[in-house]
Image (cartoon, grey):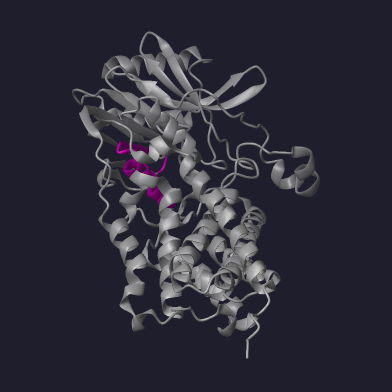
Amino acid sequence: MPSTPARRLLPLPLWAAVIVAAVGGFVYDLGFPDVSAWPLAFAGIALALLPLIGRSAWSAALVGFVFGLAFYLPHVSWTSLYLGPIPWLALSIFESFFMAGGAVLIALAYRWVPRASDSRWTRLVWLPLLVSGLWIVRETAAGTMPYGGFPWGRAALSQSQSPFAEVVAWIGSTGLGFVMVALVAGVIEWVRLRGWRDLRTAIPVVALLIVAVMAPAFPTTASGELRVASVQGNGPSGYFDERQPGDVLAAQLEATEPILDEEGIDVLLWPEGGSDLDPTRSPATAGIFDTLGRRLDAPIVLNTVTTRGDEFFNTSILWRSGEGAVDSYDKRHPVPFGEYIPDRWFYDAIVPDLTGLVQRGYSAGVNAPVFDLGDAVAGLAICFDVIYDEVIWQGARDGAELYMFQTNNADFRGTDENQQQLAIARLRAIETGRSVVNISTVGTSQVIDPSGRTIDALPAYEAGAMVTDVELRRGLTPSVVLGSWVAIVIVAGAIIGLIAAGVMARQRTARPEPVEQD
């Protein structure tokens, strides 16, 4: 049975499409923390796709740009807390251009696929998969360029507490985002084709939905427990907080004091920036950590600013009493415009007052994101490192049996930035089949088991400490094994599929009509 030609289905007027896109971006954001109404992420995707049906390239770009602004302006509003509206607006507008580009590709898919084939199954299977693949093309581009990209706000990150979360153990966040958009696009096509007249047409969407919801998390192997002490000092660790050298260290020490008599602690974990004095350069600070490690009879994982020559690094240090720094990990992805200014000559000429606030620039690390604690191997990520897949995958491949995420959210107090980051940490636990200890300077800090369940927590903006028996796991999930191949296959398949649709549509349009014989 041939499908209804797409050209017979009138698109929304441009003014209505823009309104729908604006509402869609706002609704899409509500699917993410802090509201975390995860079904609304699917609704937002639907409101992003519907206005693109029947659009020209330029009008699709406008619709996509509006959707992007309506999403990113509230989603990353925390960037304006201390630096004002310029960075917030610049980031939101820049990311919205990626949305605009992706919208053009999706609009082309909606135009070309129905012209390439009259088969309703083409519309029900090929078109939704192509649309979802092109959505991932846009996410991948935004997450990799420029300056390492900004993978914040990917569709999958809205699903950390949904029935779909366990999909990430199999195909990662990229794969889950692909499934989400495919489901929405499939439902849209089913409705457009009036699929209720033949319920067999619902098979593709229903089958994908059942697989996505019923797929269990991949089973990794338990390998024991580690007793982890983690401390949230709630010190003056924000960029503009008034403090004297050593104040942050003092706050961390004070919050650690109540747990010094706890028995059986295997490791002490402090957050990013937990020591504002570098123990590798300050003998007095080194003595403090030697004493602390001796009292606990355990190694310490701390974080501070280190220097090597003319370079600065955001560094996590494995400290053993009497031995000092026995291993280190430098943050792999310093934050552009936060921890360094890329192409500084250019941005100094545009916004010197803002770039002048970042006097020193951190260099990117190259060392492995793991520490051998003796009793276990810990995978590491420092703050925004957690949003970059390859850091997490490398940790698991290098033998990590749990993850220790150190972060400093002090510059985003009172916003939902920490909750968004915590949702990413929860998905990382499920994706790798590992426990995660996520410790912040100011909170919210949590210990998350391999299923994504919170087993211990500290409230935000209060000093405190946790001593938690954390399950260790071994074995690699399919997501870790496949790694970047999931994105490569989806992106390549989407680009090839779109080109094929365009060629087939052109050929069918150019084919002459058959001449009827008398």
- What secondary structure predominates along the stretch shown in magenta? helix
Q: Is residue 389 above or below residue 366?
A: below
Q: Residue at x 51, y 24 (%)?
A: 277
User: Which one is in front, 405 or 231?
Assistant: 405
- Residue 104 occupies quadrant: bottom right
User: Residues in magenta?
Assistant: 418-442
Quadrant of the frame with the C terminus:
bottom right
- How many labels sit on residues? 0
Q: Residue at x 68, y 34 (%)?
A: 359
**Can you give x and y, in whole percent of width and height, for residue 200 in the image?**
32, 74
Q: Is residue 311 above or below residue 74?
A: above
Q: Is residue 164 visible?
A: yes
**Can you give x and y, in whole percent of width and height, for residue 331 in the image?**
52, 30
- Residue 17 occupies quadrant: bottom right
Q: Is residue 329 left or right of residue 62?
A: left
Residue lying farthest top? 322
Quadrant of the frame with the N terminus:
bottom left
Q: Is residue 162 visible?
A: no
Q: Is residue 510 above or below residue 181?
A: below
**Can you give x and y, in whole percent of width and height, for residue 92 in the image?**
61, 58
User: Which one is in front, 171 or 97?
Assistant: 171
**Can you give x and y, in whole percent of width and height, for residue 357 in the image?**
67, 41
Does residue 110 show up magenta in the picture?
no
Q: Residue at x 48, y 18 (%)?
A: 279
Does residue 430 show up magenta in the picture?
yes
